[in-house]
Image: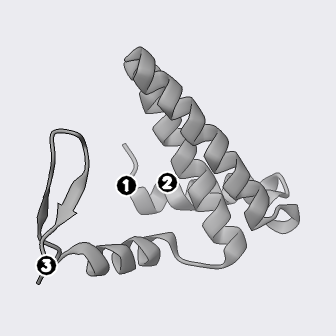
């Protein structure tokens, strides 16, 4: 099994070989990401584990390509997001709403 960085490189190479990085746009990849998220929602609603896994994988591929086109480091983006949330306190209600504790 590959690690994330190896897979990120392989996806980048795959997309580069097909001209997606050179000729694609970040907006087109964002649209593709939303299509894949819609597929995830459908799979979740059907409780179809195989399709859920497929959708998450496809979402990651579109994010890797979109980040490459935008010339941003996807892991760096994740790091920044984590740094933003790491000290947040709160809880998730039974209704699925996250309630932040005031600091």
Disc 2 is placed on an element classified as: helix
Q: Secondary structure at mark 1?
A: loop
In the picture, which quadrant includes the N terminus? Answer: top left
Image quarter where the C terminus lies is: bottom left
**Looking at the image, is 69 positioned above or below residue 103?**
above
Q: CA distance from mark 3 to mark 1?
A: 37 Å
Residue 64, percent from left and from top: 58, 60
Residues packed near mark 1 inside 10 Å, few (<14), some (14 to 19) or many (20 plus): few
Q: Quadrant of residue 21?
A: bottom right
> What residue sits right under mark 3 in the picture?
102
* Residue highlighted by disc 1: 3
Query: Is 85 on the left or on the right of 38, as rendered?
Result: left
- Provide residue 37's location: percent of width, then percent of height: 55, 41
Q: Residue at x 43, y 78 (%)?
A: 76
Name above or below for residue 14 compared with residue 99.
Answer: above
**Residue at (29% x, 73% y) in the render:** 82
Which residue position is annotated with label 2? Answer: 7
Callout 3: few (<14), some (14-19), or many (20+) C-alpha neighbours within 10 Å? Answer: few
């Amino acid at each position: 099994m590959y690690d994330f960085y190896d897979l990120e490189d392989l996806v980048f190479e795959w997309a580069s070989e097909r001209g997606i990085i050179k000729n694609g746009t970040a907006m087109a990849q964002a649209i593709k990401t939303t299509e894949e998220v819609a597929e995830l929602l459908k799979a979740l609603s059907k409780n179809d584990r195989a399709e859920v896994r497929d959708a998450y994988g496809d979402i990651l591929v579109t994010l890797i390509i979109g980040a490459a086109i935008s010339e941003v480091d996807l892991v760096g983006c994740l790091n920044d997001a984590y740094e933003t949330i790491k000290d947040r306190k709160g809880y998730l209600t039974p209704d699925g709403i996250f309630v932040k504790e005031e600091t």
